[in-house]
Image: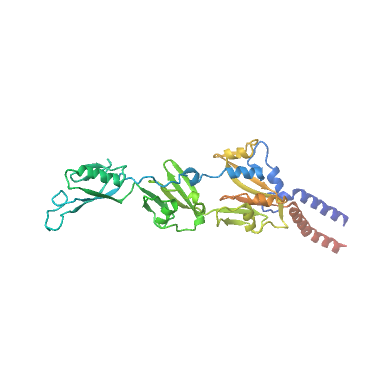
Amino acid sequence: MRLITRALALFLFLGAISGCTVLPSSGPSRTEIEMAQPADDQRYLLVDVDDRTLALLAQERAPTFGTRFGDYRPPTRYVVGVGDSLTVTIWEAAAGGLFSGPVIDRLGTGSRSAVIPEQQVAQDGSITVPYAGRIAVAGKTPAQIEATIVDRLNGKAIEPQVVVVVSRSVSNAATVLGEVTSGAIIPLSPRGDRVLDVIASAGGIKVPAHEVFVRLSRGGSTVTVPMQALMNDPKEDVYVRPLDKIVLIRDPQTFTVFGAAGNPTVVPFDALGITLEEAIARVGGLLDFRADPSGVYLMRVEPVRFAARLRPDEQPLQSNGYVRVIYRLNMRDPNFIFLARGFQLRSKDAIYIANAPLADLQKITSLFNSVAQPVVSTAAVAQ
């Protein structure tokens, strides 16, 4: 019996020293994450989450409409451009002129109006008006075009008056595509239209707002922001300029939680600005009997430039300009809640909660009991 006990004790010892590699587990232990990486082959950057880290993350915000296109003034002038369609109406004060008929009613003045058929502004930026010739209109306001036509007709028509109407404008319009009810070229009004106004003119979005990102391209700049940012922050709802392109993209945002969590799963974002504190709460928190509170990790890839700011003394492996970063938090620290509340999640973040060392010991004990019980029973029968 003593020999059997010694053999079982030896088995327990061997299981304890090798339990991390032979026992089933939901992932690496805290020791394996923090100590297993060789110094000459650093595959990821391990960063403690503290006030300095949160400050650096807050400075590393993506470009926004407000910062890139932050001119909050409406368009100063509404001018005609190539491709626009114009309608010109001309009045004369008396009969017998170029655009008025003869006097038939002795009590009437004989004044008439003539409507020039709608015409498109040609590539050279001009239109044709009878008796006035080719009129350069591109880059001018309707009022300036009216004054030019009147000047050309003076001396030919009888006190001419002119009204120019832009019946269709493509040069003062923005293109809206993607997850909208009706993608189209939306004419802009002279008062000025903001991004949300143009999206509404296209019928609004057809998917949940928290899944939509708005991409605005102007000149050589392109910026993408969440739809909810436009709805929540008036500074992001900038004025649209002629020839802007707005594309609405559906991109459901998710993060993953695995390890010793209450409900390891893939969790969709249902709002803008989910924090690490909220993320852990959504999966039921940590398992009391399994989790290591000092081994909570958030994994993501960061640009090399930002990784160098986090840890200037480290040079981890790079891939396409990015570095793997593991942010480490200790839930045993009372300051954890405040730090987790200030840590903003991004799409495709992964949160891992390591098993506690005691959990592995419990597995070894359970395995020992399952093996020892039949041996002890056999020994008892033999006696």
Q: Is residue 17 visible?
A: yes
Comparing 332 with 160, the one in front is 160
Comparing 363 with 262, the one in front is 262
- Indicate the quadrant containing the C terminus: top left, top right, bottom left or bottom right: bottom right
User: Residue 206: image x %, image y %?
Assistant: 45, 58
Residue drawn at x 20%, y 53% is 113
On screen, 367 above or below 156?
below
Q: Is residue 27 visible?
A: no
Instruction: Say whether residue 272 is left or right of residue 293.
Output: left
User: Residue 305: image x %, image y %?
Assistant: 57, 38
Instruction: Say whether residue 34 is left or right of residue 198.
Output: right
Residue drawn at x 49%, y 49% is 236
User: Residue 44: image x %, image y %?
Assistant: 63, 42
Total numbered labels:
0
Comparing 334 with 190, the one in front is 190
Residue furthest toward the bottom?
A: 381
Asked which quadrant contains residue 145, the reply is top left
Residue furthest toward the front?
A: 107
Comparing 26 with 290, the one in front is 290
Instruction: Say whether residue 227 is left or right of residue 104.
Output: right
Residue drawn at x 42%, y 49% is 246
Instruction: Say whether residue 245 is left or right of residue 163.
Output: right
User: Residue 344: image x %, image y %?
Assistant: 60, 50
- Colour mode of the rendering: rainbow
Residue drawn at x 77%, y 51% is 15
- Indicate the quadrant containing the N terminus: top left, top right, bottom left or bottom right: bottom right
